Amino acid sequence: MRDVGGKSSEVKASQSHRKKHMSSKHFAPAFTAAWFLLAASNSGFAQNWILTEANTNYEWQAVACSTNGSKLVAVAFDDGLGDGGPICTSTNAGAIWTETSAPTNVCWQSVASSAAGTKLVAVINQDLSGNPGPIYVSTNSGKAWKVTTAPLDNWLCVASSADGSKLVAVDSGSGDGLIYSSTNSGNNWNPTAAPGNFWSAVASSTDGSKLAATDSGFGDGLIYVSTNFGNTWTPTLAPVNPWSCIASSADGTRLVAANSGFGDGLIYVSTNSGNTWNPTQAPTNQWSCVASSADGTRLVAADSGYGDGLIYLSTDAGNSWTPTGQIGFWNSVAASADGSVLSAAAYPGGIYILQTTPALSLVRSGTNLVVSWQNSSAGTGLALQQISNLAATNWTAVTPLPGLTNGWYTAIVPLALNTNRFYRLEGP
């Protein structure tokens, strides 16, 4: 703030609200001819998780999303009554869920999605009799599913390349203990060169060339990486732990892994494709799941519910972590490519969504006001509106319409003369 024209500066309070089904508003302070305020854009996460309409009785085991976070797929271990679970999808960030035609007499364990959300792969841990299960794929966003030629196994985790052609799945060790891969969207599967182990999680770069897999601690307790589509695997220098989860950046250079709390209970990161690992400042917990943005700077980690039950967020590649207020028995988290749309699955509890509300930046430029906000998945479809009195309801669209340049939406409007003017982003 600064003094203009001999009059003292003044600050108008900004307000932010959320509408049902995750649409959002962000109000920005107004300018008058006598004063202006420079409002810095907020690059952090919002802190409010919203419960979606997904069935809260199902034992949701895993959730995955498209690059923009709008298309979701979730698998349930059972229906809450021990009778097996469904696979459900959403095309509007969890506002509406639809049960797919996938079998419901099995215990689904993990699911992965292509960048567009059209190609899906889901693995079964066991059927209702406790027998190992197959792997299913869908090429039409879950409308139809087909069983693949992958062997029957106690599958625990699956990952996919961005185009959905290269898949990797790990067995829990209760089956053959191997890691399998497919290079043709699941039509054929072959065991990789990874050693037999009690695998707990696997992650893939977007091109499928760089892979990382964790042992649950019932095997050697190591983290392994591959840089050639699984043809060879190398144990890393990560400490021996009962690892529960791992996630990768798009290029596979940044990795994040956590353990269940029966080890040191910490979260570790690597910035060189797993060659070296360092513990983060995340608190000791019984971590169950992690997710990463495409660039590896925005991370999400959730406790299983047997620690503090919280979900933690990092916007600086794990250097610092912030707890969110939603407590649950978390089984899975997923993130859009830019990290602005997050999803989390719990049992009991359901499926939650967290969207970062874009913050407006206001900058004076001569006799004009530059109103801008950063483009993000959470900001898709938002409209810039203005009003002179917050007690009124007749918000109007700002013209000319904002343009998108270098990842920022920007509108240039004349300064308000002798009146207040407030701006907001209105969700669709």
Image: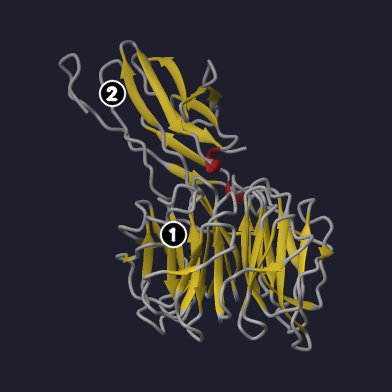
The number of discs equals 2
State the residue at coordinates (67%, 55%). 166
Res 36 label:
2
Q: Is residue 357 left or right of residue 415?
A: right
Residue type at mark 1 is: Leu
State the residue at coordinates (31%, 58%). 320
Q: Quadrant of the N terminus?
A: top left
Depth check, front residue: 227 or 323: 227
Q: Position of residue 161 (x, y in %)?
A: 62, 53
Q: Quadrant of the C terminus?
A: top right
State the residue at coordinates (47%, 43%). 357
Depth check, front residue: 50 or 4: 50
The quarter holding residue 264 reads bottom left
The quarter holding residue 58 reads bottom right
Residue type at mark 2 is: Phe
Q: Is residue 138 left or right of residue 191?
A: right
Q: Position of residue 325 (x, y in %)?
A: 43, 64
Callout 1 secondary element: strand
Callout 2 secondary element: loop
Depth check, front residue: 205 or 264: 205
Disc 1 crowd, CA 10 A, few/some/many (<14, 14-19, 20+): many
Q: Kindly indicate whether the residue at mark 2 contacts the one at mark 1 (C-beta within 8 angstroms).
A: no
In whole angstroms, how far apart are the C-alphas of marks 1 and 2? 43 Å
Res 103 label:
none
Q: Residue furthest bottom?
A: 129
Q: Position of residue 95 (x, y in %)?
A: 67, 52
State the residue at coordinates (41%, 69%). 236
Res 255 label:
1
Disc 2 crowd, CA 10 A, few/some/many (<14, 14-19, 20+): many
Q: Earlier in the sequence, mark 1 or mark 2?
A: 2
Q: Is residue 310 something one can see in this rendering?
A: no
Q: Position of residue 398 (x, y in %)?
A: 52, 21
